[in-house]
Image (tube, rainbow, N blue to C red):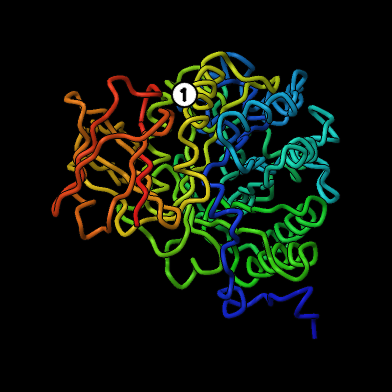
């Protein structure tokens, strides 16, 4: 029998449902993600390694015109062009810490089956080819040196089905019937033996294969990743993969953390299945969406400034929009994981840097209302709400009647989603039923603000000029 102190988790649903979310994660609230790899090379967006083999798609046409037809120039040749020659993880991490991040997540492998770590079982890795650097290891060192918790994301579970189009050939045109380079057996370890796998050109159904050999290979890769880097967080792009095999990997993650932390797990596993029978084994992650109200269990949303991989075509979210998402998510007991797209050489463009600097200015004033907080009785009040519809992230037209709440013991933080023109904030949730209000401050403004608490409302007289560009925060002392 395993030592229950050093290995407290068994690879069963019953055992893993005893998972308790560690305090560091609940306190951190905001993380930055480097969703970065060879697919950044074309600077033409997400799923490039798949869609370049989908005849007629934008990325297929781009690839043919810029690099050559995928029967002659395939994804393996894109990998060879990824150099990461200007990658400076220390400088980037300094920027991310200033911009508010309290944990950092590095993409370990996307669906493209290329490993960003010093993989012991796969030659297609960033140490062996491309950058010739241990990307995950360099990220980890930079994060830990600055006191951030370090996580990794894996998207390999779906790689088998996702890779199926590279086995095709054009149906029309000058290359009709000529096999794409994914059919070459010399590169099967990258492109995977997926000839019999069902899928359409533009969809991946099912997300996870039933191929038992791939299940075993996925486990081998993930356990290698966990053993080498001992991550504080492991993100899976989907539900728990492959039934019992997935449970073995989660148990490996938690028991590795427990051995490091005196028998107490400090790691977090995030996955995307909202089934209440599954979610207790870790934290639910909701890609580019969220919940409508406060949740009993901590959760996470992940989103990106632009596209998941660098894309010259995309319009970025503004700092204002990102901070609005953050506040709304945190008020509902959630965390925000934000991808900042990197160019293939490892640098950020000027737009991204400017957004991060704006966020740094905001966190320097308002971070107190984010870090270490817990949800209040309700997440907020007011007429405006985010649209919850798959991947929609439309900016909200907030009004001066919209507020979001967080708390620390006897302190309630009230975020003003829109600064009122008349100089008064009227918060109906803070009538006498909420407890006696003793003092109100605006974070970033010295001294206290005048207020009037009535049975049905708290009215606060605000200073003439808000302290930051967006989303001001009241510190309300209750007694």
| Residue 60 in view here | no
Assign a secondary structure to mark 1. helix
**Left or right: 182 with respect to 304?**
right
Q: Is residue 274 above or below residue 136?
A: below
The N terminus is located in which quarter?
bottom right
- Residue closest to the eye, 66 or 381: 381
Question: Which residue shows up at 39% across the image and 24% down it?
Answer: 467
Residue designated by label 1: 58
- Residue closest to the eye, 465 or 381: 465
| Quarter of the figure with residue 178 | top right
- Residue closest to the eye, 209 or 262: 262
**Left or right: 219 with respect to 314?**
right
**Left or right: 447 with respect to 119?**
left
Q: Is residue 470 above or below residue 233?
A: above
- Residue closest to the eye, 24 or 218: 24
Question: Which residue shows up at 32% across the image and 44% down it?
Answer: 404
10 Å crowding of disc 1: few (<14), some (14-19), many (20+): few
The C terminus is located in which quarter?
bottom left
| Residue 442 in view here | yes
- Residue 213: image location, x then y, percent: 71, 62
| Quarter of the figure with residue 443 | top left
- Residue 396: image location, x then y, percent: 27, 33
- Residue 172: image location, x then y, percent: 48, 26
Q: In this figure, what is the number of numbered marks?
A: 1
């Amino acid at each position: 029998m395993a030592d229950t102190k050093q290995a407290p988790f068994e690879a069963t649903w019953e055992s893993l449902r005893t998972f308790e979310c560690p305090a560091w994660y609940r306190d951190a609230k905001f993380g930055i993600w480097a969703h970065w790899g060879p697919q950044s090379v074309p600077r033409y967006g997400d799923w490039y390694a798949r869609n370049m083999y989908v005849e007629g798609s934008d990325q297929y046409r781009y690839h043919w015109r810029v690099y050559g037809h995928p029967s002659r120039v395939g994804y393996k040749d894109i990998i060879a062009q990824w150099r990461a020659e200007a990658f400076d993880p220390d400088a980037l991490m300094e920027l991310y810490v200033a911009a508010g991040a309290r944990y950092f997540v590095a993409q370990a492998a996307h669906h493209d089956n290329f490993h960003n770590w010093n993989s012991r079982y796969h030659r297609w890795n960033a140490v062996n080819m491309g950058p010739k650097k241990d990307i995950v290891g360099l990220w980890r060192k930079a994060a830990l040196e600055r006191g951030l918790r370090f996580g990794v994301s894996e998207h390999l579970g779906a790689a088998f089905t996702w890779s199926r189009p590279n086995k095709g050939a054009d149906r029309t045109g000058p290359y009709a019937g000529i096999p794409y380079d994914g059919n070459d057996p010399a590169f099967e370890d990258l492109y995977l033996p997926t000839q019999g796998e069902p899928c359409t050109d533009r969809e991946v159904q099912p997300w996870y294969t039933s191929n038992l050999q791939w299940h075993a290979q996925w486990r081998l890769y993930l356990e290698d990743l966990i053993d080498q880097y001992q991550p504080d967080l492991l993100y899976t792009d989907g539900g728990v993969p492959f039934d019992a095999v997935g449970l073995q990997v989660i148990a490996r993650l938690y028991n590795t953390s427990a051995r490091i932390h005196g028998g107490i797990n400090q790691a977090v596993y995030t996955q995307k299945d909202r089934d209440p029978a599954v979610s207790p084994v870790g934290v639910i992650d909701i890609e580019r969406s969220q919940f409508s109200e406060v949740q009993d269990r901590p959760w996470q949303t992940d989103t990106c400034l632009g596209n998941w991989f660098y894309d010259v075509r995309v319009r970025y979210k503004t700092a204002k929009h990102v901070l609005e998402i953050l506040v709304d998510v945190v008020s509902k007991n959630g965390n925000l994981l934000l991808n900042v797209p990197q160019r293939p050489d490892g640098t950020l463009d000027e737009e991204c840097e400017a957004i991060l600097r704006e966020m740094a200015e905001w966190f320097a004033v308002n971070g107190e209302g984010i870090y270490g907080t817990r949800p209040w009785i309700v997440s907020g009040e007011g007429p405006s709400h985010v649209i919850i519809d798959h991947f929609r992230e439309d900016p909200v037209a907030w009004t001066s009647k919209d507020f979001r709440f967080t708390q620390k013991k006897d302190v309630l933080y009230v975020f003003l989603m829109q600064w009122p023109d008349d100089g008064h904030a009227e918060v109906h949730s803070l009538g006498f039923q909420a407890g006696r209000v003793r003092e109100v401050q605006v974070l970033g403004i010295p001294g206290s603000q005048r207020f009037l608490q009535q049975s049905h409302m708290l009215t606060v007289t605000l200073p003439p000029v808000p302290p930051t560009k967006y989303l001001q925060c009241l510190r309300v002392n209750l007694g």
